[in-house]
Amino acid sequence: MSVSTLKSPDKDLIKQVEAVLFVASDGALIDQIASSVGVDSDRVLAAVESLAKIYSDGGHGLEVVFLGGRWHICTTPDTSDSVTSFRESNERENIRLSKAALETLAVIAYNQPVTRSEVEEIRGVRCERVIDTLLTHGIIRISGRKKSTGSPLLYRTGEAFLRVFGLGAISDLPTVREIEELRSCGEGVEG
């Protein structure tokens, strides 16, 4: 049966099956899809096959495949360079910050612009490597030099800081007082 001869409910079924396959990161069995969309397995299998044909005929970057006993929506082999490039750049942006990096970042965010020695004085430990890491990821940036002996670099938060922490502006950070209030409220709560 071609997609053009499907009746409206069948097009809706294809849409429902497509949505289920899209969110099924480990693929899905026909029976699982049938249970999710509330129709029998034969109709779901026909919808999966129709969806596979739609993707293969339409010049899409996705395809429906049967792998390991399950149906999947996957990217097509000819899109692998683009997908790999995106994944690599996305992984660079998804940074896991250590406790030391978070502490250093907090000092910079609340005292900016600030020199490395000022950060180290507040934290009580050296932090040149942490600062280098934060710079590499664009979470902090160099904002000039302090007019003092040696003209040390000044650091402040960068654009990535706002994006990573979901802030519109640096002024959206909670004040130290607000943090202390939240902390004192949390200490009185038992789990």
Image (cartoon, helix red, strand yellow):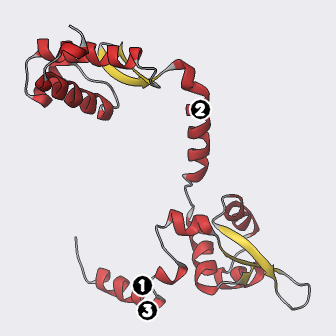
Q: Earlier in the sequence, mark 3 or mark 2?
A: 2
Counting other residues with Cα less than 10 Å from the Cα at mark 3, is it few (<14), some (14-19), or many (20 or more)? few
Please name the residue shown 46% across and 20% down the image.
59
Horizontal and vertical percent for residue 10?
15, 22
> At x 8% / y 18%, what residue is drawn?
40
Give me the C-alpha separation between circle 2 and circle 1.
Answer: 43 Å
User: Which mark is in front, 3 or 2?
Assistant: 2
What percent of the width, then of the height, locates residue 143?
A: 75, 77
> How many angstroms separate mark 1 from mark 3 (CA)?
5 Å
Q: Which mark is residue 177?
A: 3
Q: Is residue 95 above or below residue 29?
A: below
The picture quadrant where one finds residue 51 is top left
In percent of width and height, residue 170 lies at 54, 79
**Residue 3 or 24: which is nearer the viewer?**
3
Q: Amino acid at mark 1?
A: Ile
Q: Amino acid at mark 3?
A: Arg
Label 1 crowding class (10 Å Cα cut-off): few <14, some 14-19, many 20+? Answer: few
- Helix, strand or loop under label 2: helix
Q: Residue at x 77, y 81 (%)?
A: 117
Quarter of the figure with the C terminus: bottom left
Kindly indicate whether the residue at mark 3 contacts the one at mark 1 (C-beta within 8 angstroms): yes
Please identify, in this view, whether the residue under mark 2 or under mark 1 is nearer the observer: 2
The quadrant in which residue 68 appears is top left
The residue where tag 1 is placed is: 179
Instruction: Report the side of 38 relative to 23 (left or right).
Output: left
Q: Indicate whether 81 appears above or below 53.
A: below
Q: Is residue 184 left or right of residue 88?
A: left
Counting residues from the start of the chain, the first of labels 2 and 1 encountered is: 2
Q: Is residue 101 positioned above or below 183 on the image?
A: above
Q: Secondary structure at mark 3?
A: helix
**Residue tagged 2:** 82
Q: Label 2 is placed on what type of residue? A: Ser
